[in-house]
Image (tube, helix red, strand yellow):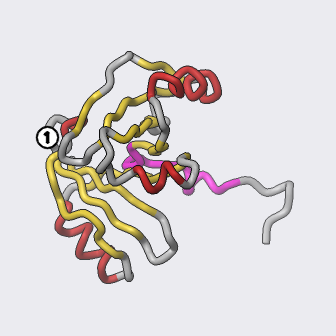
């Protein structure tokens, strides 16, 4: 239990591998301005189509360089895997962490009861670097991005 007088320990300060937070939206173009304003972030106007994942994505960068990126994810067609999520209202979808080895991370997450929902595959938005998707036993969808 904590009181209002206590603060988060310095040792809890983020140290580095949190890459981005992903939000599913119906339209990047119609959503980006609101996200940019409310998060005080910048957008470079680049939208990337990833046929391997069936989505279009864009990233917003915080004015604070140490903060994670914000990813807006839009379905790219009727068979996009994010359509069911969007039909339930969209919104906060996943957290992404960079890891040195996808294989080691997936082995670790399996040992903790995580379900691998998408095996490693190259991601267009990350220059072909591999990603994998995991659903944790606490019902959090995590994307792992290989360094």
Q: Residue 3: where, in percent of width, then height? A: 85, 62
- Check if residue 114 falls in the magenta segment: no
Query: Is residue 139 visible to the viewer in this orientation of the structure?
Result: yes
User: Left or right: 29 with respect to 6?
Assistant: left
Please state the extent of the stretch shown in magenta in the rendering: 8-19
Please give the name of the residue rendered at 23% of the width and 53% of the height, measured from the top-left corner. 131
Please give the name of the residue rendered at 20% of the width and 69% of the height, measured from the top-left corner. 104
Looking at the rendered image, the quarter that the N terminus falls into is bottom right
User: Left or right: 17 with respect to 127?
Assistant: right
Q: Residue furthest right?
A: 4
Q: Residue 89: where, in percent of width, then height? A: 58, 49
Q: Residue 38: where, in percent of width, then height? A: 64, 27
- Check if residue 12 falls in the magenta segment: yes
Tell me which corner region of the image, top left, top right, bottom left or bottom right, holds residue 112: bottom left
Please give the name of the residue rendered at 26% of the width and 50% of the height, measured from the top-left corner. 145
- Disc 1 crowd, CA 10 A, few/some/many (<14, 14-19, 20+): few
Q: Is residue 113 above or below residue 73?
A: below
Q: Is residue 125 above or below residue 92?
A: above
Q: Residue 29: where, in percent of width, then height? A: 46, 22
Front residue of 129 and 16:
129
Query: Is residue 63 visible to the viewer in this orientation of the structure?
Result: no
Circle 1 residue: 128
């Amino acid at each position: 239990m904590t009181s209002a007088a206590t603060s988060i320990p310095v040792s809890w300060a983020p140290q580095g591998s949190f890459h981005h937070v992903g939000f599913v939206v119906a339209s990047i173009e119609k959503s980006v301005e609101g996200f940019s304003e409310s998060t005080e972030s910048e957008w470079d106007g680049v939208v990337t189509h990833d046929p391997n994942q069936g989505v279009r994505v864009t990233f917003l960068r915080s004015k604070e360089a140490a903060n994670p990126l914000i990813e807006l994810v839009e379905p790219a067609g009727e068979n996009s895997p994010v359509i069911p999520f969007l039909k339930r209202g969209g919104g906060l979808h996943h957290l992404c962490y960079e890891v040195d080895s996808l294989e080691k991370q997936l082995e670790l997450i399996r040992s903790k009861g995580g379900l691998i929902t998408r095996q490693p595959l190259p991601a267009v938005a990350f220059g072909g670097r591999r990603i994998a998707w995991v659903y944790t036993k606490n019902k959090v969808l995590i994307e792992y991005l290989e360094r």
